[in-house]
Image: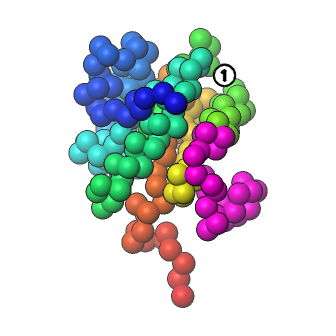
């Protein structure tokens, strides 16, 4: 297994990463920090440095399991910080249709599932068609979502030239209005 590529803002803007990563991150940052961006938590996390990042070239996904594991370990250190991991995918030479990006997203989740050292947790159904399903890695439930250039009508889903996949541990949503069952 390859080494983790878990990064902060400074590392994403450095010359240590490919130029497309710098460009994709800057586009993302401009969208997310725009005052009219409708995701309060995304804006706050970006501005406060709570978010973490990585990137994925088309031809080498080997660092991804170690990166996601490092992110989850960071969450264990300070679980009260509402962190998210944003994975930047190498841009396509030409923008693709939305179905292409959907398949790519599911291929990445399948890759992670195949390379997860832990068994699927018993608290979560393993069938994505089940309404209680959520993506899991290392025994942790996560909200995983994709942003892609092909999204044209939802400003929160088009973050620039790269597909960007977000991973947010479900525990960061505890205590937020509308996230828990009412009795």
Residue 123 figure quarter: bottom right
Colouring mode (rainbow / by chain / secondary structure / one colour):
rainbow
User: Which percent across, then down, holds residue 126?
Assistant: 71, 57
Q: Which residue is mark 1?
A: 96
Please, is residue 58 above or below residue 52 in the view?
above
Residue in front for this viewpoint, 10 or 6? 6
Looking at this view, name the residue that lies furthest to the bottom. 183
Position of 122 with respect to 142 (left or right) is right
The residue depicted at 42 percent of the width and 49 percent of the height is 72
Bin the neighbour count of mark 1 within 10 Å (Cα to Cα): few under 14, some 14-19, many 20 and up. Answer: few
Q: Could you tell me which residue is drawn at 50 percent across and 74 percent down?
A: 180
In the image, 158: left or right of 74? right
- Residue 157: x and y in percent read 52, 39
Q: Is residue 123 above or below residue 168?
A: below
Which residues fall within the magenta stretch?
112-135
**Residue depicted at x 29% and y 26%:** 11
């Amino acid at each position: 297994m390859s080494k983790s590529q878990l990064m902060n803002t400074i590392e994403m803007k450095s010359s240590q990463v490919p130029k497309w990563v710098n460009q994709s991150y800057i586009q993302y940052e401009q969208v997310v920090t725009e005052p009219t961006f409708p995701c309060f938590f995304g804006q706050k996390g970006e501005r406060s440095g709570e978010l973490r990042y990585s990137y994925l070239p088309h031809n080498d996904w080997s660092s991804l399991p170690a990166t996601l594991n490092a992110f989850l370990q960071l969450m264990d250190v300070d679980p009260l910080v509402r962190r998210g991991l944003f994975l930047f995918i190498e841009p396509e030479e030409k923008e693709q249709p939305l179905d292409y990006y959907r398949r790519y997203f599911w291929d990445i989740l399948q890759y992670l599932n195949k390379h997860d050292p832990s068994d699927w947790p018993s608290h979560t159904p393993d069938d994505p068609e089940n309404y209680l399903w959520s993506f899991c890695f290392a025994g942790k439930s996560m909200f995983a979502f994709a942003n892609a250039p092909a999204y044209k009508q939802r400003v929160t889903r088009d973050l620039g030239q790269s597909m960007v996949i977000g991973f947010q541990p479900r525990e960061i949503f505890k205590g937020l209005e509308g996230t828990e069952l009412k009795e």
